[in-house]
Amino acid sequence: MTFLKTAAAAAVMVLAAQAAQAGTTFDVVKARGKVICGVSTGVSGFSAPDSQGKWAGIDVDVCRSIAAAMFGDASKFDVVPLTPVQRFTALQSGEIDVLTRNTTLSLQRDTALGFNAVAVNFYDGQGFMVPVKLNVKSAKELNGATVCVQPGTTTELNLADYFRTNNMQFKPVVIEKQDEIVAAYVAGRCDVLTTDRSQLASVRVTQTPKPEDHVLLPEVISKEPLGPMVRHGDDQWMDLVRWSLFAMIEGEEYGVTSKNVDEQLKSNDPNVKRILGVTPGMGKALGVDEKWAYNIIKQVGNYGESFERNVGKDSPLKLDRGPNAQWNKGGLLYAWPIR
Amino acid sequence: MASAHGTGIKPPARRLTWNDPTVRAVVYQVIALGLVAFGVWYLVSNTLHNLETRKIASGFDFLTREAGFAIGESPIYFGPENTYARAILVGILNTLRVAVVGIILATLLGTIIGIARLSKNWLLAKIASLYVEVMRNIPLLLHLFFWYALITEIMPGPRDALNPMPGVFISNRGIKVPSPTDHFAFDLAAGGFLLGLILSVVVAQWAKKRQERTGLTFPLMWSSLALILGLPLLGWLIGGAPTQLDVPVLRGFNFQGGATLTPEYAALLAGLVIYTAGFIAEVVRSGILAVSHGQWEAASALGFTRGRLLQLIVLPQALRVIIPPMTSQYLNITKNSSLAIAIGYPDIVSIANTTLNQTGQAIEGILVIMGVYLSISLSISLFMNWYNKHIALVER
């Protein structure tokens, strides 16, 4: 593990050199014939291998939509599973083209780390999960608790901030691998597991022996806008990533689904016509085929379909849309217009 | 011979020619050095250039910024409001804490097992062989996972903690023991302990000199034991013999007060010691076997008991063979302690990783880790080399 990280650091030096000389990511990806995305090491609903060993999840769908936009084929992608500590080095070094890994967009990451935050694909917030038998009803009762948390995350910082603000003490137990930290929590090494609430829901359903023995506390202690990130100075590539995501969101807004997308080609709505490339221009501006958004919606589905399939009512997680509903349905999803 | 100077025959003038092996050697070395220097320059300048074009922050300014995260265990106070520099210091101390204790325990355990493997007792020798073959053939990472899982999965939670004796609690949060309160007497006792250690060394040297002069032996073990245990006791008595201890009590989620042996530290220490002891046992065994059989026989003929024989004749000679490979084992313990990251012990790698992730300054973070391990390893090497020289056979 240590070796991997040292190697990763050495790779920063060597690969950073190569990536810079090899031209823009857009051209590199096009020449390679597939897009390489960094994902988590396994958070069910976001990015995790399914029963056939294929990576699936709402983050993987962003990756697939980029592949669909670029190549007209959503299967032309590879994923690189990354721990929180590895993820930024992997993007900086050019090992991956885009980080689609439930990563919180923040000022520090947008600037000092040399990235650009592209757009939000999931609005989340940090929460706490505790065993029911502890009989804790609120995060304010957690004084003196031992808390399991993954290192190198915004979660780790929010946690320290929250306890400081509320004048409470805690002991952190930090383990890098998602599976190991959950195992430590389940074994009772910690009283509390903290991370984004969607992830907690995922862990509760898929990684605890008895989900009903664990409960999420009501407090949401932070804003966690999760979304893809690309390297600084890679504008054309950033455009493609952003608008691939927006195409999924706009698709839902205008009622275009993977099922009806072929009928929608005959739609009279000028918005739909522009999105699906019936009125040309958008694809050319992005430097891809005019059918880019058609391919995304046809092969990956719109945002709503992706949400329900991975984390919503068609998944074991059963998350509500909550803030991830469209802006005109009481949520925060507000894609910029495709025009 | 002397006339050779006068005959006018001069040695041929040195000419720079490719046929001269010295010239070739120098040229090759210059080329090799140049290539290495170019490689380093290329990597460094390219890295700097790329950091610049990507606008990735660089430099060590981040060390003075507030860290903002908490650390699970630390020998000195650390809170989220402290700086990254202090966080890294905590990591270094945690690494040293596990490396030093690990080296001492692994040496003791390894020596015992190494000697046991040579025992005439068939059962003991076989058990020692089995230990060596099993323990050193299991990867260290598995050792760590095993011990960590053993502690966290099998031990009860803090509310049902085992209480083998008053004030001691064993749970999956670690072992809690009473600790001395903040009393002057305990400081005196600690001082007495240190003084006892120093005096023991002084007494040992005096006893050695006296024995060389007069042949009289001195009960060194008992005197040292008396000094090391007696002086702290004396200090404690002088301080007023306080009996108050900081006893851990279950309050809220966990035990408060007392001293803790955390599961992470315990698992890491157990894994390192048990794994490395297997190697050390073999080093010790090979060292003892390297002492020629004649030495054993001669000592036996002089009437030495087996214990005295080992202590006075065999081990001092064996040490010369043992020390160099032992140095490698000590370095291994120190470097292997970085596997702590897998079970969440906050060592230097764990903390530097968190730091480099929060700040995004991967290169600086890795440099810190490399610098720390290099310093620790070189210190161990220097000390062991000095010790090796100290005990080496003095040729007369």
Image (cartoon, coloured by chain):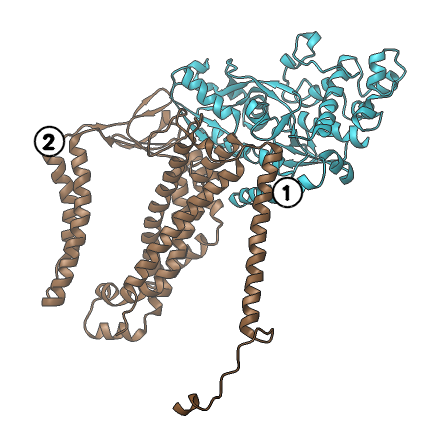
Chain colours: A cyan, B brown
Instruction: Residue type at mark 2: give it.
Output: Gly
| Residue B259 placement (x, y as % from top left) | 29, 32
Between residues B16 and A119, which one lies in front from this camera angle? B16
Label 2 sits on a secondary structure element that is loop
| Residue B153 placement (x, y as % from top left) | 45, 34
**Mark identifier at residue A17:** 1
Circle nearer the viewer, 1 or 2: 1
Q: Using residue B103 as the reference point, say whether residue A14 is left or right of it.
A: right
Residue farthest toward the right in the current orientation of the protein = A266
Task: Evaluate whether label 1 is on the same chain as label 2.
Answer: no
Residue contact between numbered discs 1 and 2, judged by CB atoms under 8 Å: no
Residue B251 in sight here: yes
**Mark identifier at residue B240:** 2
Instruction: Residue type at mark 1: give it.
Output: Ala
Question: What residue appears at the point 14 percent right and 48 percent down from the top-left corner?
Answer: B226
Question: What residue appears at the point 54 percent right and 27 percent down from the top-left corner?
Answer: A208
Asked which quadrant contains residue A265, the reply is top right
Identify the subunit bearing mark 1: A
Between residues B117 and B241, which one lies in front from this camera angle? B241
Label 1 sits on a secondary structure element that is helix
Residue B117 in sight here: no
**Mark identifier at residue B170:** none
Q: Using residue B3 as the reference point, say whether residue B315 is left or right of it.
A: left
| Residue B231 placement (x, y as % from top left) | 14, 43
Between residues B267 and A125, which one lies in front from this camera angle? A125
| Residue B63 placement (x, y as % from top left) | 44, 32
Q: CA distance from mark 1 to mark 2?
A: 68 Å
Mark 2 residue crowding within 10 angstroms, few (<14) / some (14–19) / many (20+): few
